[in-house]
Amino acid sequence: MSQIIALTNQKGGVGKSTSAVNLAASLAALDRRILLVDLDPQGHASMGSGIDKYALEKSVLDVLLGETSASDAIVRGLPVKYDVLPGNGDLTAAEVELLDSDQRQSRLSLALQTVADDYDVVLIDCPPSLNMLTVNALTAANGVLIPLQCEFYALEGLSALLDTVEQIKQSVNPDLAVSGILRTMYDKRTSLTREVDKQLRDFFGDALLKTTIPRNVKVAEAPSHGLPVTQYARFSRGSQAYRVLAKEMIRRLSL
């Protein structure tokens, strides 16, 4: 049975899409069959995987609206070695389109059921907000991976997200659990990072992943080349960190 992991944080700029792309690539490099679902209207996960988001004939929006199957919309055979269910700015219409739809919270879950067995892991890159798209992701997932920066507002936003996860768990998805909290753009030299890091350890304990993703220019450059950093600059500190993350997730989730 495949693991479906939603990467989410309603705060933007925390390295969510970057982590989705590079975790997908790192798991694929370890011979896991990976599907990356781009549920963010910004389409960054699609672009970072080498897909032109402006030239999509079919996207995850078409799947959510029941206009095509997940299998028909998935892009396969990419140089990144994982498959992608792409998304773009058309997803901004999803809120209105799904508002009066039957099973509007479960559209993604139902669609993924038809392809999930083809993969070991399905990673869902969520938008930076707790909207209907994120609710669809959390309804479909059995795990949540939360990327965050060690900064002043990190804990406040995290509390709101965990409340939403608990609500989804209580109402529609009892199997949902936090798979881990990932510290990104990590710089242990700063006192703020060390202070927030201690708060996270004290409050979340084992939910906090051991792996940290450092600030690294190669990680920032890679998306402009349509590649994960693990392929763009495989020996960089950022690439090495995502490879370590993949191994930790494999152990944690028994993949």
Image (tube, helix red, strand yellow):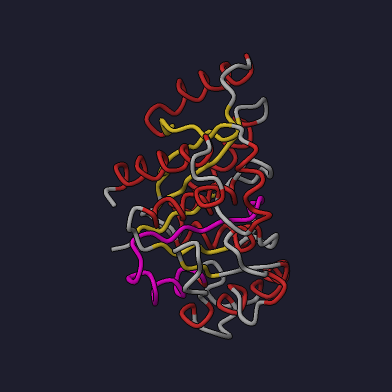
Q: From what the image shows, is residue 137 above or below residue 247? A: below
The x and y percentages for residue 98 are 64, 73
Q: From what the image shows, is residue 51 above or below residue 193? A: below
Question: Which residues make up the magenta segment?
Answer: 108-130
| Residue drawn at point x = 28 percent, y = 63 percent | 1
Name the one closer to the observer, 79 or 115.
79
The x and y percentages for residue 64 are 57, 75
107 drawn magenta: no
| Residue drawn at point x = 56 percent, y = 82 percent | 66
Q: Identify the residue at the far top of this view.
A: 191
- Tell me how many marks there are: 0
| Residue drawn at point x = 64 percent, y = 53 percent | 223
Left or right, residue 12 beside residue 134: right
Q: Identify the residue at the far bottom of this view.
A: 67
Left or right, residue 94 beside residue 246: right
Q: Quadrant of residue 220?
A: top right
Name the one closer to the observer, 224 or 68.
224
Q: Quadrant of residue 193?
A: top right
Q: From what the image shows, is residue 197 above or below residue 53? A: above
The x and y percentages for residue 106 are 50, 69
| Residue drawn at point x = 44 percent, y = 54 percent | 5
Q: From what the image shows, is residue 140 above or below residue 62? A: above
128 drawn magenta: yes
